[in-house]
Amino acid sequence: MLFLRIIEIVRSLGHLSEALGRVYYLSERVISVDKNYLFFKQNFDTLLKQYPHRHIIIKDEAVVGDYESFDAAYLAATGDHGFSLGTFLIQCCDREESTARFAWNNVMFGANAA
């Protein structure tokens, strides 16, 4: 329903193809982050044993690095690895940590995983 309303608004502005391209681009990024989070949840026990109290970068459903802090993981993901924002997940491997954190278009979001 919301998607149809967005299309109506965009049509009225005359920028449909550009806007639909952006919607597709954003939906691909959401799917990427969702798959990475699902990978984390499905493999939590194994990841917790392998990376206790570490912040891991997950991209394409694989761990690509582990770091002491979220900030270190973020800098490595966007710097050393050159990942685009919204294409990876940073997650702390800790039973006490209940927040999924990821970077999206220069903004950091926290989503309660409980």
Image (tube, rainbow, N blue to C red):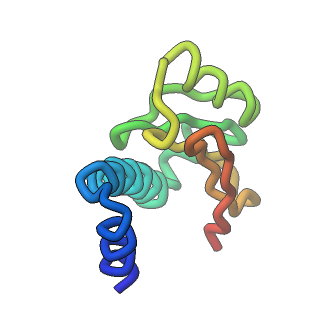
Q: Nearer the viewer, residue 93 or 86?
A: 86
Does 99 appear above or below 5?
A: above
Q: Quadrant of the C terminus?
A: bottom right
Extreme-top residue of the structure = 80
Does 15 appear above or below 108?
A: below
Residue 56 in the image, given as x and y percentages of width and height: 58, 36
Extreme-bottom residue of the structure = 1
Q: Nearer the viewer, residue 107 or 36?
A: 107
Q: Nearer the viewer, residue 112 or 62?
A: 112
Tell me the quarter of the picture where residue 75 sits: top right
**Residue 10 placement, left or right of 52:** left
Q: Is residue 43 visible?
A: no
Residue placed at 43% from the left, 51% from the top? 33
Residue placed at 52% from the left, 36% from the top? 85
Residue placed at 51% from the left, 54% from the top? 44
Tell me the quarter of the picture where residue 7 sits: bottom left
**Residue 48 placement, left or right of 6:** right
**Residue 86 placement, left or right of 97:** left
Q: Is residue 80 visible?
A: yes
Extreme-left residue of the structure = 17
Residue 64 in the image, given as x and y percentages of width and height: 46, 27
Residue 90 in the image, given as x and y percentages of width and height: 59, 41
Q: Quadrant of the N terminus?
A: bottom left
Does 12 appear above or below 53?
A: below
Does 83 appear above or below 96?
A: above
Residue 27 in the image, given as x and y percentages of width and height: 34, 56
Residue placed at 60% from the left, 20% from the top? 76
